[in-house]
Image (cartoon, coloured by chain):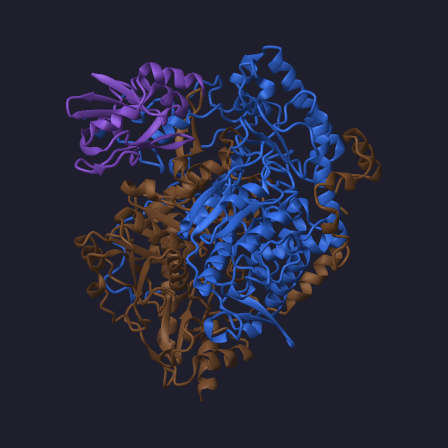
Amino acid sequence: MRYLPHSEADREAMLATIGVGSIDDLFSDIPANLRVHGLDLPRAAGELSVERTLGRLAAKNVPASSVPFFVGAGAYKHHVPATVDHLIQRSEFLTSYTPYQPEITQGTLQYLFEFQTQVAHLTGMEVANASMYDGSTATAEAVLMAHRVTRRKKAVLSGGLHPHYRAVVETTSAMASDTVEALPADPGATEDILARIDADTSCVVVQSPSVYGHLIDLAPIAARAHEVGALLVAVVTEVVSLGLVESPGAQGADIVVGEGQSIGNALSFGGPYVGLFAARAKHVRQMPGRLCGETVDAEGRRGFVLTLSTREQHIRRDKATSNICTNSGLCALAFTIHMTLLGETGLVRLARINHANAVKLAESIGEVSGVTLLNDSFFNEFTLRLPANAADIVEKLAAKGILGGVPVSRLEPGNADLANLLLVASTEVNTDEDRAAFVAALKEVLA
Amino acid sequence: MATYFTKDHEWVRVDGDIATVGISDYAQSQLGDVVYVELPEIGKQLAKGDEAAVVESVKAASEVFAPISGIVEGINAGLVDQPAKINEAPEGEGWFLKLIIADKGELVGLMDETAYKAFLETL
Amino acid sequence: MTMNTQGRPTDAGSAGVSSTDTFTGNRGLQIEEALLFEVGRTDVTGVDLDEPEAFAPRLGKLARKSAIDLPGLSEPEAMRHYVRLSQKNYAIDSGLYPLGSCTMKHNPRLNEKVARLGGFGDIHPLQPLSTVSGAVDLMAELGRWLIEMTGMTSVALSPKAGAHGELCGMMAIKAAILARGEPRDIVLVPESAHGTNPATAALIGFKVVTVPARPDGTVDPAAVKALLSPQVAAIMLTNPNTCGLFERDVVEIAAAVHAAGAYFYCDGANFNAIVGKAKVGELGVDAMHINLHKTFSTPHGGGGPGAGPVVFSSRLAAFAPLPFIRIEADGPVLVEDETAVTDGEQPFGRMVAFHGQMGMFVRALSYMLSHGADGLQQASEDAVLNANYVRAGLRDVMSQPSGDRTCMHEVLFDDHFLDGTGVTTLDFAKAMIDEGYHPMTMYFPLVVHGAMLIEPTESESKASLDLFIATLRHLVQRAKAGDVERFREAPRFAPRRRLDETRAARAPKLKWERPQAFDQAAE
C-alpha cells in the first residue's frame, strides 16, 4: 500500500522491540468476540484505478463551467484566479493543523489576522472571527450569541432569509428550547418585520440581498430593534454584493454573518464553504469560534496567537460560547488570497460586472411574454414569476443544456403560491452568448 | 476585621455589615496572569455559593462564588481595565466586590487564615 | 509615544524593528513579511477585469457610500506574500506531527486532484438533480463504506466537522427522547472527554454530569451505573479514549446505558485505531461521528474544513437530519425536504444549508478506495504499532500515568519524569520545536498531570520514529542533566520565540488598525 512506509521486516523488528509476538497482541484490549476479521469492501487500488473510478462518477455530473449557468440561491459561480488554488495547496498551508503552537504557525495566524481584518472592513464591523463552517451555521450561532447578549430567547426571522438557513436556525432553536418566529416566504419584499419586534425579541435576522434578490434597507430595522434592546443580525449570502452595496455595519447591524464561498472557493456541491462572522467589539467575548490576535514574542517582535480562548469548548467545556473546534481555515485562506488579489479596486469592479450582467439579463428576460420580474432592486440575482411550474421549466432548460436557476419550490416545497417562482443569478462568468441562449431557450420551453 | 476563606479559595473580610470578597493568593498563583474579570451588577442579590464573578487567565476560566449571601453593594470596577491587580495584590487592591451581609451566621462554616493555610498544605 | 520619521510607532511590536541583528529583520531563509494592510494599496489589483458598459443600476437607495479599505496586491506580490507566510508554518509534509487525538497523517495528493474534477468541484448544490447523479452516487458509496466499517444502520453525511457531528448525534438522541415523551435531560460525560462533548450537550439544553475516570483514564461501568437514572438521556464516550486506551468494558457500559433507557454516543475522533479491527455497532454504540479529516486523511488545512458524518444504530436511524440519501431500487435518492420523507423517517431537522462537505467526501472516498479493506486494516495496525513502538522506545526514560501497558494509536506520558528538573511539559514541548518537531498534544487529557499525548500515525517510517525517539531521549537526558536554559529559552530557532499570550488577551487586538498619522499622534 503506497501510503504505508513499513516493510514486513520493519514490522517484525518493531514488534520485537515492543516485546510482543504479533500485531494482534496490541489489540488484546478489544474483546476477542468483537474483533472483526475482514470488511465486505474492495481491496486496495492503485492511483490510476481510483482516478478512473471517481472520474466515471464525476463524468455523470454537469459542471457549471460547461453550460450557460444561472444558478445561485446561496452559492455562486465565480471565476477564481489560478494563483488561489496554487497557494492553498502549498504543503505548509494544506497539511498544517490548527495553530496551537504559534511559534511555528505564524503563516496561518497572520493570514487569519488579515482575513479577520478584511471581513471586518467588508461588513463594516469592528471585529470578525477566524471563520465558521458556512453561512447557515454562522447564522444559527449568531442567534445563540444574540440570546447570550440580550438574555432573551426569541429570534424573529425575515421571510427573505434563505429557507435552509431558516431551517438550521429552527433546528438548533427547537433543540435548545428557544423561540423562533419565522415570517412567511417573502418573494415580493413586502413583509412588515418591524411590527414583529417586541420587548421579548433577542434578535431579528434579515438577509440582504434577500434569498429572492431584494436589497433590504436595514437601517429602520436596526433602529426598531435597538429601541427594544434587541440585536439586528444581518445575513449576506453573496459577499460580492458588498463591493457595491452599503455594508450592514453602516446600516446598524450588531452581528453580520455571511457565506464567503463566492470569494476564492469552488461550488463543490455545497461544501466546504466558509462562514463569515463579524460583530461589535463590545460583544467580542460572546462570539463563537476562533479569534486571532496580535502580540509580541520574547524578543519583542510582532507575532500572532489564538486568543480569548476561554470562550471556547476546550477550556470552558459545558459553559463555552459554542462547541465549534475545527472551522474552515483553508477556505478562509482561499477567501483572503482572492480578496487580496482583487483589492478594493478589483472587488468593486467585479461587483459592478455582476450587477451589470444581472441587469442586462433582467432586461432581456423582460421581453419573454408571461414572465414577470418581482424585484425593484437586486444585485446579481432576482426572482421571476413564470407562467408555468418553475421546477418543470428548469428541467426542460437543463435538457437543452442550460442551467437556468433555482425553482423556489426546491427551497420552499409544498407551497403552491411559490411553485412558479424562479431564482436567477448572473455573475461575471456569463457571456452575452449565455444570456442570449438562456432567453431563447426560455421562450421555447414556455411556448 | 476578620478574614475568612473558602475551600474554593475565595476570601471574605468583614467590616460591620459589609463583607469584601476576593480570591486568595493561592488562587491567583494557580490561575496565572489574569486577563479578564466579569463583575456582578450592583444591587444583585447573591445566595451563598452563587456565581458572583468570573475571572480568566489565558488558559483557564473560573467562577468566583459568593462565600456568603448578601446584596452586591460595590464592585472594584478598576479591575476590568487592570486585571493584573489580582495577581499583584489579590488580598488587597485586587478585591472583587462588597456585599451587604444577609446572615453573619454563614461565616461560621468558613476557615480563618490559619485553617486555610493548613488546608492548602493538604492540596 | 516615541515616533520615527515616518510617523509610525517604534515600539517593539512594529514591523521591521526588532532585536534581531540583521538590517531587514530576516534570518536567511526566514523572511519577515509585513501585513497585507501595510504593503497593499487599494488602487492595486491582481485581477484583470474590464469595466462593464454603462448601465442603469438597480441598487435602490442602498449603493455603498463609503470606501471599504481593502488593499490589493499584484499577482507577483501576492504570490510572494503568501509563499513567505507559508514558510513560517510547520506541516505534515515537512515533518512528523505527533499531535495526539488530531491524527496528522499523510494527505495524498490524488485526493486533491479528484476533488477538483469539474464534475465534483464545479457543480452547484441546487442545480437539477438530473445533472448531478454522479455526486449522489458518490455520497451513497461513501455512506456504504462508513456503514460497513462501523456496523451501523444509517449515516448522516451533512455535518461539517467533528463537533458538528457530535451536535447532530446528540440532536438525534434528543429527538428520539422527545418522541418517546420522556423528560430525560442529563448527559454523562467522562472527565477525560474532549471539551466539545460537554459543550455540545450543553448547547442543546442537556445538563452535563461528569463520570469520574479510573486511574488509567478508562471508565468504570460501576461508576456509570451509579449515575444512570430515568433522567439520563445519554452517555458520551470516546473509544479508544483520550488516553489512547480501548475501553475494555464498553459492552457492559452500553448494556447498562440501554437498560436504563438511555443512548450511547461515541466520540469517533479515535476511530482510526480500530478501522477493520472492531465495529462500533457491535459495541452497542447508537451514534458516532467520524472525522473524515482525521481517520480518512482529508487535509486539516490549518484548522479546517473538516467533515463529520454521523453513523446511527437502528435505534436512532429514523431521526437522521435532512438531507439524507435513501437507497431505492433504482439507485440512491437525495431526500432534501419533508415532502419527500416516507413512513418511518423522522428527520429532526437540518444541520446545514445544502448537503455537507462534498469536497471532503470525494477526498475521503479516494482515500478509502486507495486503501481498500486490506489497506484500511493495515493502516490501523500500523498506527497502533507505531504508537507502541514510541512507547517502547521511551518507557524507560519518560513516565506513563498508569504504568507501561499496551496502547492503541497514541501513547500518553505525564510530567512525572520531569520532577525536580525545573522543566515543565510546556518547556519540553517547546524544546522539541528547536529540534525540528511539532510538539505532541500537551495538557490534554485533563485527567493526567502535565499530559503529553503522542500520536505518530501510520504514515511514519521506522527510521523516522527512531530519530524521533532518539531526539526525545536526548531531551530527557538534557533536562535531567540540569540544562534548564535550553528548555526555558526554547524555541530559539523558530520564526518566533514564545509569544506573549497574556498581552494578547488583556488588550485584544483582533484586526489591523491604521497607525495614527504623525499630526494626530502628536496632539
> Which residue extends farthest top?
C482
Among the chains pictured, the one given blue colouring is C
Name the quadrant of the C terminus of chain A: bottom left
Looking at the image, residue B36 lies above or below residue A336: above
> Which residue extends farthest left?
B16
Left or right placement of residue C436 versus residue A161 in this view: right
Number of marks in picture: 0
Name the residue: 59% across, 60% down.
C313
Residue A180: where, in percent of width, then height?
32, 62
Name the residue: 34% across, 55% down.
A242
Residue C103: where, in percent of width, then height?
61, 41
Left or right placement of residue B2 versus residue C124 in this view: left
Q: Nearer the viewer, residue C235 or C392?
A: C235
Can residue C518 be seen from the camera position used here?
no
Q: Colour of chain A?
A: brown
Residue C303: where, in percent of width, then height?
51, 43
> Which residue extends farthest right?
A9
Q: Nearer the viewer, residue C46 or A291?
A: A291
Can residue C517 be seen from the camera position used here?
yes
Looking at the image, residue A60 lies above or below residue B113: below
Looking at the image, residue C99 lies above or below residue A46: above
Quarter assignment of residue A350:
bottom left
Q: Colour of chain B?
A: purple
> Which residue extends farthest bottom?
A447
Residue C480: where, in percent of width, then height?
62, 13
Q: Nearer the viewer, residue C398 or A283?
A: C398
